[in-house]
Amino acid sequence: MRAFCTFLFVLTVGSAAAQPPDVPADGGDADRISVGGEVTATYGSDDPGFFNYATYAYDPLRNVRVVFDVSVRPLRPIEVLAQVRTDGLSQARMAALYLRVRPWRARDIDLQAGRVPTAFGLFGRAAYGGDSALVGRPLPYGYLLSLRRDAAPATADDLLRMRGRGWLSNFPRGNIAPDRGLPIVNTDTWDTGVQLRLANPRLSWVGAVTVGSLGSPQLDDDNGGRALSTRLTARLHPGLIFGVSGAQGAYLSRTLDGDLAAGESTARLRQRAAGADVEFSAGRWLARGEVIASRWALPAFTGSTMTPVVTALAAWAEGRVRLLPGLDLGLRVERLDFGDVATPAGIQPWEAPVTRVETGVAFSPIRHARLKLAAQHNRRPLGGRVRQDTLFAAQVALWF
């Protein structure tokens, strides 16, 4: 897959260099080359509780993100899409690179291969940042749990010691060095594999087979497993959309295989998730919400032959109202809960539940610019060095 993505990158850059931007596609289609980008600068309060810390070790509330997108269409049914992203102006990465084939003009069907968009969830595919008045992400799409892909707990107490420490957790199995944990859904980068999308005016379905997992997308297969993900949406009314999602995949690295009990393998220890969402819009109002349930199979604890399973349940809802042309007011309320594990001290949640409320105002003075001010309150009473905090942020976004 690494070689395939390298080939796509060479094809994209080579085609872009060989064709002037204004060359039309065959049959009068859109331009063969399309280039776009976005610069987003955010400055906010210090976040000592790491409520917004991200998988690439940056703080989304204090960050400058530059996104560069390019689409090259060498033939009418074939398109190569790439995205280069940098956070903090110091860490550039290829966030997406894939080939899209649309064999029929009259049918909305396409096949994609490479580092493809996630098929799961309301927020994960497009991140809808342009129409939101808020700065933070929903909790299931960014909040780091203590679980890691290269380390695992040996006992239930190991889990409890790391509650609220997803920004720097450590376990006795595998890589013992402290490092970042996994979110339920990773939106910082996309997984590598193949994806099929079918759509009509009422229904849309997408399914994917990839090498990583929902919370740990990968460029290369690192555990011998395969991930499956799917999403179905139904437009029941021009302003009403329902969606359901599902995913399952091996999330641990094979470097842990030597620390597992006899008969266990990382390819069999999987993250499974299901979600349901709804979006409704009418006039100046827009509302959306989602519920996601996820579970992870862990390596057997010391002295046990059973495979322990930990669970999480996330729910969030947000609304936006357009007060004046270009001026929006938004509010999101969300909760992230966790299942219980048995310990010598009794039954306890394996992670620290989080409650968040965020409100914000956004103003677009011109078409390609958006200014935001937001306030976010987080509460996590059962774990972490900081149990609650109120954060503020200002953001400027420019795109072309």
Image (cartoon, rainbow, N blue to C red):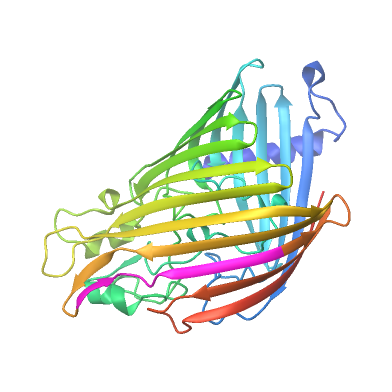
| Relative to 264, residue 337 above or below | below
In the image, residue 272 lies at what x, y percent?
Answer: 34, 49
Image location of residue 155, percent across then percent down = 21, 72
Q: Which residue is at 57% across, 74% downward? A: 377
- x and y, in percent, of residue 14 in the image: 73, 38
Depth check: give the residue in front, 153 or 14: 153
Q: Is residue 172 left or right of residue 3?
A: left
- In this image, 97 relative to 271: left or right? right
Residue 359 part of the magenta segment: yes
- Based on the displayed image, in which of its 4 quarters is residue 300 positioned? bottom left
* Residue 121 visible in the picture: yes
Q: Residue at x 76, y 60 (%)?
A: 362
Residue 238 location, quadrant: top right
* Nearest the eye: 256 or 31: 31
Q: Which residues are magenta?
A: 346-360
Q: Is residue 148 visible?
A: no
Nearest the viewer among 277 and 274 is 277
- Residue at 27% in and 53% down: 269
